[in-house]
Amino acid sequence: MTPRTFPPDFTFGVATSSFQIEGGVNEGGRGPSIWDTFCRTAGKVQGGDTGDVACDHFHRWPEDIALMKSLGVRAYRFSIAWPRIFPTGLEDTPNEAGLAFYDQLVDALLAAGIEPWVTLYHWDLPQALQDRGGWTWRGTVVAFAHFADAIGARLGGKVRHFITHNEPWCVAMLGYMNGEHAPGHKDWPEALAAAHHVLLSHGLAVPILRKYAPNAKVGITLNLVPGYPASPSVADADATRHFDGFFNRWYLDPVRGKGYPPDMVADYRALGRLPAEGPLPFLFPGDLEAIATPIDFLGINYYSRAILRSDKLPEAENAPRTIPEPGPEVRTDIGWEVYPDGLAVLLRRVAADLPGIPLVITENGASWATPPGDDGVVHDTGRLEYFRTHLAVCADAVAEGVPLTGYFAWSLMDNFEWAYGYAQRFGLVWVDFTTQQRVPKDSARFYADVMRTRAVPERG
Ligand code: FCB
């Protein structure tokens, strides 16, 4: 069989985010973020871990760029810590030291032949904005537009790819609905307002970035999860519809100019998450038009699928579920099922939903804590196979005509995995958090070969 190959202009990269790798939280005039606060709230982050040091990338960035270069990485997706630029989010003038940090990072990346892909918001909101309501407060939208302006003004001349937001679903639902992420609230109306404000701030930021970087590509990254009904029953089909609306369509539809999905508005009204009738409380004239501002690409983060089991299965339909609960052998350390076919289904569906919009996998990866062996080498076969099978799906999709133009592995290196602290390791590179030593894993060598040859081998 001929190996699967990627076209010459396909972008291969690796991804990280500011809070997960930087450390240096009290340096360079950085203000506190909601994650600093959350880490200090008892019981919120496993092991009481914090982002105080993380991968110490704030000091070791030259070494990290050299590491990427040695692996043949040609594109690097990272995020800007908002509180390094505006320590409270409310200042008029940006903090020069913060801007200078990212400016020198971008220059060094370009000098190393690595294309910077800049995410504006990957969850580290200035705490002072949270004190005013965070994403539930419309003022945060204005503050974000101001932040986008400062980044555009400083980096717009040299950065050619911007992502406004990373995973609005996580920001809104984990942050304000189930409380698993900062700021740790559990309130549905707040969460829906937060989701809207994140989307609105995206829509306002797109033209601001384009003003400074007319040739740059600007997009948003959504975490999308294809839903599979556990059985052919009507109840499971409806649970799958609801899940898809909750997780995917609530974000995809307004971005593609369709507004909020009416079936979900009805569900949320019935469930008391939105007022029973009348306008949506957070929606003002012009908002949906702003959210629908055309984008140059859609970023997709894919990790796994969801299997939907309704608890309302009627007696008559109580047939055995045709998709059994996946066992531990197909799950990564974090519990997520390894399911590359879900990515195939998702890519085709999104390509059909957003015709003509280039798609980029902005994150994909797997958590296994496989440590270095006696030989000092990390034989992370599970992760290597995860990347191999998901990259094969991407190559097939491209061959079929899906406008997939890039793939970023999550993550360059092990890092602070949010509520799991340092317990979950997604890196291509092992990080010893005591010595800060970086050790490329087998999966890193595998991915380096894929990037170099633009081909996915049949076997790892
Ligand atoms: C995504 C996040 C990223 C990382 C991966 C595992 O939801 O964007 O920061 O935590 O999951």
Image (spheres, rainbow, N blue to C red):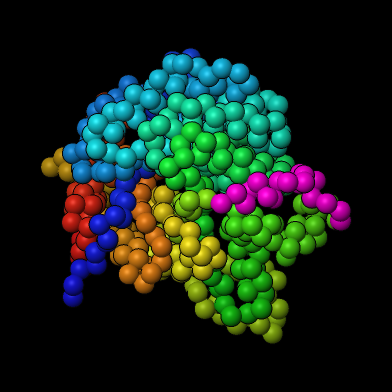
Along the viewing direction, whichever of 450 and 93 lies nearer the viewer: 93
Residue 179 magenta: no
222 sits to left or right of 426:
right
Q: Count the marks: how many?
A: 0
Residue 109, picture quadrant: top left
Task: Inspect the magenta stretch and tell me whether residue 280 lies in it.
Answer: yes
Residue 232 visible from this viewpoint: yes
Check the image and name the residue furthest to the left: 375
Across and down, in percent, residue 148 comes to 54, 32
**Is 253 located above or below residue 96 in the figure?**
below
Q: Does residue 193 appear left or right of residue 272 in this picture?
A: left
* x, y percent for residue 353: 55, 65
Q: Residue at x 39, y 60 (%)?
A: 404
Q: Quadrant of the C terminus?
A: bottom left
Residues shaded magenta: 277-294
For the N terminus, which image quadrant? bottom left
Residue 54 coordinates in the image, percent (x, y): 39, 29
Residue at (61% x, 18% y) in the render: 92
The vertical placement of 88 against 303, above or below, is above
In-front residue for pair 342/257: 257
Point out residue 245 in the picture as x, y percentages from the top left corner.
64, 61
Depth check, front residue: 52 or 200: 200
Can residue 78 be spotted in the picture? no
The correct choice, above or below, for 444 with respect to 38 in the image is below
Which quadrant of the figure has residue 424? top left
State whether the magenta stretch is mostly helix, strand or loop.
loop
Judged left or right of residue 295, residue 160 is: left
The residue drawn where x is 56% and y is 40% is 207
